[in-house]
Amino acid sequence: MSVDRNKVTIAPKSFPAYENAVRESGSVLSELDETVGALIWTDYSDPNGLKELLAKNPQLEFVQLPFAGVDAFQEVLDAPVRFACAKGSYREPVAEHALMLAMALGRVIPERVRAKSWGRKFAASLYDANILIVGAGGITEELIKQLAPFRCKITVVRNRVGELPGATNTVQLPDLDEHLPAADWVFLACSLTDSTRNLFNLERFGKMKESAYLVNVARGPVVNTMDLVQALNEGLIAGAGVDVTDPEPLPDGHPLWSANNVIITPHTADTNDQVVRLFSIRIKENLAAFKGLGDWVGLVDPELGY
């Protein structure tokens, strides 16, 4: 039997919004059989399930993955299938969350929400600050827009050569250490790959200003957690805001919970409601592209790992 590019399967769990997105794209929701060419995979935590499904269904030509990060699927990406992820889909809420964490840190909100007395006056402003952002995807593009009113000098660290609109300077990952000492705020918005795992460790924290802040909305393992605890408690950096941790969820009693001037949010930069709404848009876009009726969005490069 030949593959029908109009037929789509959602697995392992379907949602009404995703089913509506399939129908609105002009495609047909179908049980998985040898005629189905497109798969919407909805479970980030089950890469083995996807691997087994692909092995049993060699006719599949396109798989849409649910989140921007595809680090969990590294062993699957070598399959002879076109993969797309949700990179860029959640850029607005995640960039907004990163900005919120930065502003809260600059006004020592972790200290003030626990205060029982009037206390000290302190503020670190984003206005005219030196910003360093690691990663050059949709979150970074959106964060640059949100930072525009603050007149920041923005250096973006990325894997590939190329400028980024709104950035003052764009450099490559090997140049990170050269630019890190000048940064007042460091935002992590990169993919988790072999080159970014434990990218921020005690050595790199030691290169940062004691007055500098770290904000991580990327993946937890981009930062060495225990090194971050030490950096915060020894005053190597001024504070940190993290929406992602390693391990995750962060266990009760973990030393990071009690580290100095840290804000921890439980991977809520994008909520379930936001994800469902925005991922539905990506489904429609890429099902149209699969049928030759539009442009692909968020294609995954297996060699780069994102």
Image (cartoon, helix red, strand yellow):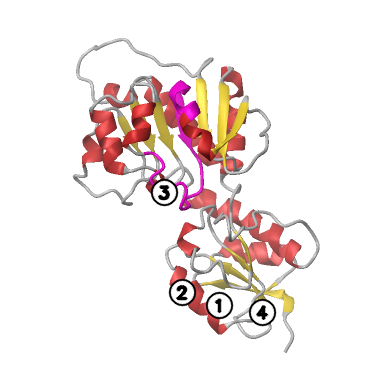
Give coordinates of residue 96: x percent, y percent: 52, 34
Q: Is residue 186 magenta?
A: yes
**Badge 1: how crowded within 10 Å, few (<14), some, or many (20+)?**
some
Nearest the eye: 57 or 134 = 134
Nearest the eye: 206 or 41 = 206
Secondary element at tag 4 = strand
* Quadrant for the C terminus in the image: bottom right
Secondary structure mostly seen in magenta is loop
Residue 49 marker: 2
- State the CA–CA distance, disc 3 to disc 1: 28 Å
Horizontal side, residue 263 vs residue 148: left or right = left
- State the CA–CA distance, disc 3 to disc 4: 36 Å
- State the CA–CA distance, disc 4 to disc 2: 18 Å
Query: Cβ–Cβ below 8 Å for labels 4 and 1?
Result: no
The residue beneath circle 1 is 54
The residue depicted at 65 percent of the width and 81 percent of the height is 59
Query: Cβ–Cβ below 8 Å for labels 3 and 4?
Result: no
Query: Cβ–Cβ below 8 Å for labels 1 and 2?
Result: no
Residue 36 marker: 4
Of the numbered discs 1 and 2, the one sitting upstream in the chain is: 2
Of the numbered discs 2 and 3, the one sitting upstream in the chain is: 2
